[in-house]
Structure formats: structure tokens, C-alpha cells
Image: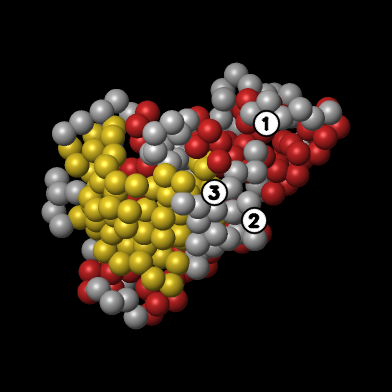
Amino acid sequence: MAKRIDVQGLTAYYGSHKAIEGITLHVEPRSVTAFIGPSGCGKSTFLRTLNRMHEVTPGGRVEGKVLLDNEDLYGPGVDPVSVRRTVGMVFQRPNPFPTMSIYDNVAAGLKLNGTRLRKSQLDDVVEKNLRGANLWNEVKDRLDKPGSGLSGGQQQRLCIARATAVEPEVLLMDEPCSALDPISTLAVEDLIDQMKAQYTIVIVTHNMQQAARVSDRTAFFNLAAIGEPGRLIEVDSTEKIFSNPSVPATEDYISGRFG
Ligand SMILES: Nc1ncnc2c1ncn2[C@@H]1O[C@H](COP(=O)(O)OP(=O)(O)OP(=O)(O)O)[C@@H](O)[C@H]1O
Ligand SMILES: [Mg+2]
């Protein structure tokens, strides 16, 4: 199920603006990797290149390779829609389908994939994933109400349930807890911990404690100056990054001296 990610020399542009440059990174299956770094260094951009969401932005293009178990996601003939099915994503801002019910939001991906399930099986999938995202108790009596009627934090947990329901092989999460209270944050961290038995997970976070709690490896990104492209500065075991990083800029960032 879980797949290995090998990124080789990846550069991403918005039109003529080079947002990130020359990123080479390996992510082991069944592990959690945290991306950290100051605002604007390209963490979200890089994350979106890992499931071909970057090219959805007008002017968005990449150079380099992203291999998923040796298959280049940018190779000729690869269907970006099927890539996004295999590599799921939870966005920085919650984006439930506004007119769809809570139930249908969770079931949406399965229906799109053409997965045929009996109603009772679908009910089980919806319940399991809403429980996993720590949302079930809050919504079980109003599953037929629109997803847009939930609070911001509830919407984010709904989006997590929607992303996990299709059982992707890789799950990308862009600051999934930035709108959550501490209890939901811990619930999502528990969920990530459980999910890594099955999935390859990459999470962007501005919360150093969160990176230290949930991730096996941490990648630090930075830019040399405003307007310069973001680069991967250092990637290592999370323990090493937070106790004895090799690069002084990493130390400065994690100890709060900049960013
Ligand atoms: N749609 C876009 N069009 C043009 N430039 C963009 C677009 N999205 C991001 N950028 C630029 O790309 C660079 C990297 O942005 P990105 O959102 O990837 O940073 P980030 O590290 O995720 O920041 P944050 O921590 O604030 O979320 C920035 O200079 C940003 O202005
Ligand atoms: Mg971002």
C-alpha cells in the first residue's frame, strides 16, 4: 500500500517566478515526514508538486522528477487525476464541498473513484473515517446537513475524513491543524500516528512541538532572501534536527531566532 517517494532535482515555477529550486528528497513508506521553514519558503508549493496539484495553478510548472515506487509522476502518459487519487491531500484552508452533506463529503471520493459499495458498507466507511478524524460525535445526528454548516475546525476534520476515506497510498497534509483547538489537534496527531502503519505521510507544520511529536524525519526549507527560490536546507531524523542539526540556519529556525 504505502509507497516510497523519491524527488530528484525538483524546481517549481509560477509563470516566470521560480518558487523552489533543486529539491532532492527521499521519503520512506510508512513514515511521517514534517516540512518546516519560514512563511513563503515554498513548503505548500513543494507539497503540491508531489501530487501534481501545482500545475492546476495557471503558470504552474515543474522541472525534475517525482518518483513514486520508481514511477515518475510527471512521466509521459501519466494521468494527473489518477495521481491525485493515489496521493491524497488535506489543504491549509478547509475546503469541504459546500452544497454536499457531511455524509456525502466523506463518501465523495469513493463515489468519484467508482467504488461500488452497499449502503451499509458506505455507512461503515463514513463512520470509521469521521471517528478517525475525531468528528463523529459532533456530527452523527446531522450527517445529512451541508458540510459548509460546520465550524472551521470541524470542516478541517471533515476534509481529513474525506481524504482518508479513499485510502490513498500517500497522504499530504498542509498545516492540517492550523485551525484546530488543542484537543482536535491531538486527535489528528493520534490519527497520523495510526495512519503511518499504512500510509506514507508528509505534513507541513509551523508548530515545532507538533513536528517533534508526529514525525520520524524533518525537512527544513529556507530561502536565501525575499524573491529567491526556496531550497531544502537539511533533512534528517526528527531527533537529530531538533537536538543537533548540521546546518546553523536550521538551529536558528528551530530555536526561534528567525522565521
Ligand atoms: N498561486 C501563486 N501564484 C504565484 N506565486 C505564488 C502562488 N502561490 C505561492 N506563490 C509564491 O511562491 C512562494 C512559495 O509560497 P508557498 O505558499 O509555497 O510558501 P509556504 O512555505 O507554504 O508559506 P506559508 O508557511 O506561509 O504557508 C511565495 O513566494 C509565494 O508568494
Ligand atoms: Mg503554506
Left or right side of 22 for 205: right
* Quarter placement of the C terminus: bottom left
Left or right side of 66 for 148: right
Task: Determine whether the residue tagged by mark 3 lies in a helix, strand or loop.
Answer: strand
Task: Determine whether the residue tagged by mark 2 lies in a helix, strand or loop.
Answer: loop
Q: Quadrant of residue 149?
A: top right
Q: Amino acid at mark 2?
A: Gln
Q: Which residue is mark 1?
A: 110
Q: Which residue is mark 3?
A: 170
Judge whether 180 appears above or below 241 on screen: above
Task: Determine whether the residue tagged by mark 1 lies in a helix, strand or loop.
Answer: helix
Q: Nearer the viewer, residue 162 or 144?
A: 162
Sequence order check, earlier mark of 2 and 1: 1
Sequence order check, earlier mark of 2 and 3: 3
Q: Quadrant of residue 233?
A: bottom left
Q: Residue furthest front?
A: 76
